[in-house]
Image (cartoon, coloured by chain):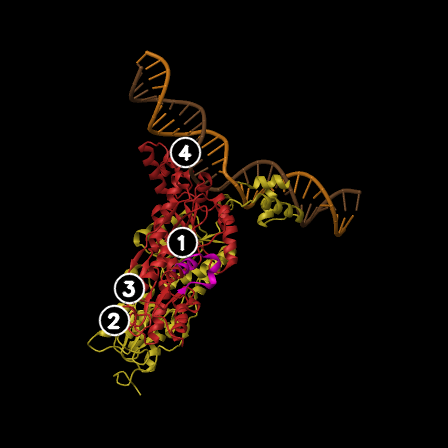
Chain colours: A red, B yellow, C brown, D orange
Amino acid sequence: MAGIKDVAERAGLSIATVSRALSGKGPVSSRSRERARAAAAELGFVPSYHASSLASGRNHNIGVVVPSVHRWYFSSVIEGISATLIDAGYDLTLYNVSEGPKHRQSVLNDFLLRKRVDGVIAVALKLSEAEIRKLLAVHRPIVGIGGTLPGAASIRINDFDLAVDATNHLIRLGHQRIAHLTGGSVYEQDFELPGTRQRGFERAMQDAGLAVRPDWNIPADFTIQGAYASARTLLGGAAGRPTAIFAASDEMAIGAILAARDFGLRVPYDLSVIGFDGHELGEVFGLTTIDQGARDQGSLAVRMLLSGLEGDAGSVATEAEYPAKFLIRSSTAVPPDDSPGYRH
Amino acid sequence: MAGIKDVAERAGLSIATVSRALSGKGPVSSRSRERARAAAAELGFVPSYHASSLASGRNHNIGVVVPSVHRWYFSSVIEGISATLIDAGYDLTLYNVSEGPKHRQSVLNDFLLRKRVDGVIAVALKLSEAEIRKLLAVHRPIVGIGGTLPGAASIRINDFDLAVDATNHLIRLGHQRIAHLTGGSVYEQDFELPGTRQRGFERAMQDAGLAVRPDWNIPADFTIQGAYASARTLLGGAAGRPTAIFAASDEMAIGAILAARDFGLRVPYDLSVIGFDGHELGEVFGLTTIDQGARDQGSLAVRMLLSGLEGDAGSVATEAEYPAKFLIRSSTAVPPDDSPGYRH
DNA sequence: CGAGCGTCTGCAAACGTTTCCACTGGTTGG
DNA sequence: CCAACCAGTGGAAACGTTTGCAGACGCTCG
């Protein structure tokens, strides 16, 4: 395995000059640079990652912590992050903590503190201030996506306002009997999004003077399957059904649409459904939704991180609000005539 | 930032003893071990990853190369890999090459050769022998999942035979007019699965003396959306429609079912659909499929890799065939009465 | 009671880069 | 014409661990 020493000998240069020539840092005559390059190529020299990191203190490696790699939102963010990092010459170390608190603990305490990443992107992860402080002590830049990290930079959409908008969209169409599918349950403690969107929904309903029925505020796990099951219960309910559903994710909205079809309900004529995300699959269902550009958020997070890494100025804890796009398709319409929610 | 030196001073021990105490290697009196541990805890000492890797030659880091992180199969495999690696104390460096050949090249040539991972798991990636040789020169263990890697270990299901089984399942029910949704197009050059399943389909059809219509052999990109579009064309065709569809992935099968519903076709009474994968969402659709245990495959790959890493014997290029499970649910049945494909 | 063995310990040499510093020789400006 | 500067170079000191080697110490066994 050829080392830089071998390259230096072959090129007739000192180790220092070869290092400078290959890394592009510091002044090197073009003649020496050429020689170094040639020698390195001939020997198939690849610098040792660990040695160079140890000496320079830079890893060229970003840690990404996600609560799941399976769900659409996270895999989209990861794709955005990954593509941008590869272009920048950085590695991406993935920490998926979907297995529960045990993994979450060990990632936070054992893995991330070993100085092997230059920065951390935490996706939709709720961290305590103590946890953030510990991380910041080791890694200068931390960027959160989805949910604020007190003391660190973050990118987020305005979940609350957007949830209000989504709900208002339904209300303005004339709906009064509106149900909400929220994320809920499992990840409750690690997340903050579900609650925020739910609060936006409740606020809009209250402002419009509409009732928020607790039994129409259903956790559905963020998945198609979960929402399908929840929506079946909801729509099969004897005590009347909603004319519209606001789902806190597109996957749940799709689950709701599938359930509606089972009952012979036509979307949007019998039931309006609005989602939240911008899932590609939404097109197939004509889903009205709020496109939050998950991929772009990932890409943006990387750029923030990297700029905070190269220029030291950017270490400020900025909070970027990502602009989401309201996407009106064909899954929402005025409520059916016979509905008590109809308004003229 | 406390180093091992500080810990040694505080504990009144030598650096060497502290290192041995904390790593658990080499003989250390329980008294010294206790002292070292205490001092490390007090100082919040975390060993420098790079220094220890440089000195020991071990990275505790596995590289995972995937052609996409978005599609169900890959995110499932990644989850399996991730969970198993975290338990083993290993990092997972993710290389997603979905952006095309440029990223594929730079990952293979620049990233993976920098000796920063102890081993590589390549998921459904077709590598040339030259590429494998180059990787093997740097990293001892390489494990492929889905598709064989000449010269390296691999885990795979028997795509061909399973595709034959799936097709035969339909044939035995009495279907004669069977279409196939294959993966196709984009990833063609990096993949081998799509072709294999397609060949299995064709073989079973031929063996049963049934016609394989080229226009019923449709690429659908492995996605729900792609299959939905393809199936709409297929089912809307004036020249008669198939009574059954075999989709090379569950996502495509679901897309086909959605398209069928659009045409008012009831699954399975008017149309049988069989998938391939074991997607959780299949339950919602009652999808008959072949569960290939993607998550488990990931987990198994890690165990193979790690055992080849610790015990040096395992470096043999074994090919493990993963047992898939045929999962009969309610999306397949005998063809409709009026169908020319009906057989009594 | 001494040799021998095993456990435990510390010194110091790796590991393979980057980068500070000092030094050269040539150019520029006063 | 000399001082000041600058691009280019090489020596050598980091970076923070692991680990080979050898010594110290306490036991056991003959």
The amino acid sitting under disc 4 is Ala
Labels 2 and 1 share a subunit: no
Report in which chain the residue with disc 2 lies: B
Q: Is residue B280 visible?
A: no
Residue receiving disc 3: A283
Q: Is residue A258 visible?
A: yes
Give the camera-side residue of B203 and A102: A102
Residue receiving disc 1: A146
Q: Are marks 3 and 1 in contact (CB under 8 Å)?
A: no
Q: What residue span does the magenta drawing correspond to?
A: A181-200
Q: Is residue A63 above or below residue A287?
A: above
Give the camera-side residue of A249 and B253: A249
Q: CA distance from mark 4 to mark 2?
A: 65 Å
The amino acid sitting under disc 1 is Gly
Q: CA distance from mark 4 to mark 3?
A: 57 Å
Q: Is residue A189 above or below residue A331?
A: above
Q: Secondary structure at mark 4?
A: helix
Report in which chain the residue with disc 1 lies: A
Query: Is A190 one of the magenta-colored residues?
Result: yes
The amino acid sitting under disc 2 is Arg
Instruction: Residue at the far left: name it.
Output: B238
Q: Residues within 10 Å of mark 1 (few under 14, many from 20)?
A: many
Labels 4 and 3 share a subunit: yes
Residue at left 32%, top 65%?
Answer: B223
Q: Secondary structure at mark 2?
A: helix
Q: CA distance from mark 2 to mark 3?
A: 15 Å
Report in which chain the residue with disc 3 lies: A
Report in which chain the residue with disc 4 lies: A
Q: Secondary structure at mark 1?
A: loop
Q: Secondary structure at mark 3?
A: helix
Residue receiving disc 4: A16
